[in-house]
Amino acid sequence: MPASARPLSPHLSVYRWEIQMVTSIVHRATGIFLSLGMLLVAWALLALASGPAAFAGVAAFCASWIGLILLLGWTWSLAFHLLNGIRHLLQDLGLGYAPATFVRNGWLVTIGSVVLTALVVACVFAQRGAA
Amino acid sequence: MKTAVGLGSAKSGTRHFMAERVTALALTALGLWIVWIALEMLHMDYAAARALIARPYNAVLMIAFLIASFWHVQLGLQVVIEDYVHARGLELAAQIAVKFVCFLGAAASVLAVVRIALGS
């Protein structure tokens, strides 16, 4: 909290929910969540380097209900952050700022992230069938 | 970029802006690659998983992914903390903590990949 009561600009509560602000907020939220995912990546690699017993611990965590829910969350977060990140990079080049295009791309990214997640889940189930 | 560096508020901001975007560009490819690796490893036993990461091109791409990711995480969380943590002491502590954790995470996991690649 600021030490003095300075006037602040209107915050989230005064705005109507629109795809433009939702994608912006979700980009941040998925970024923070993916940061935590890097801890799992680090843990998995350290376990892989140290031995079968440690690696079995990672595998057990990933196969648990909490692990599966987190992995699904990370998959969708990565899909969204990746697609919206590409959108941001194109915007940095000055592209896609016309309001209609901006809104359309927001929906493209949102729907695309769900499609990508479904693809990954389909790959997981296909492998399970083959194994 | 050339005209902004070293001038006024662009002193270090431009460097942050560029580093965030260059790591983002690298991660568009490496992010897809890590999903492929994860799917490959899904039903592998320990020896096969280790052999997969030990392949030179996978080891190199993994190290690139780790450095780009932890760097991008640090840059991203830095902005989030700047935006939402308004108490000076807490903000400084949070920024330093994020930098330490990201550096330790990167160093430890890169060493792990090197150990896997060298079979030690």
Image: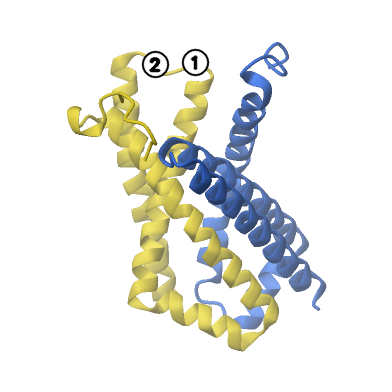
* Picture quadrant of residue B44: bottom right
Q: Residue furthest front?
A: A4
Q: Is residue B9 above or below residue B25?
A: above
Q: Is residue A78 visible?
A: no
User: Disc number at residue B44?
Assistant: none
Q: CA distance from mark 1 to mark 2?
A: 7 Å
Q: Amino acid at mark 1?
A: Gly
Q: Amino acid at mark 2?
A: Tyr
Q: Residue furthest top?
A: B3
The spot of residue A118 in percent (x, y) is 34, 55
Whether marks 1 and 2 lie on the same chain: yes
- The colour assigned to chain B within the rendered structure: blue
| Residue for badge 2 | A97
Q: Secondary structure at mark 1?
A: loop
Position of the C terminus of chain B by quadrant? bottom right
Closest to the observer, A6 or A108? A6
Chain for colour yellow: A
Q: Is residue A4 above or below residue B78?
A: above
The spot of residue B32 in percent (x, y) is 54, 50
| Residue for badge 1 | A94
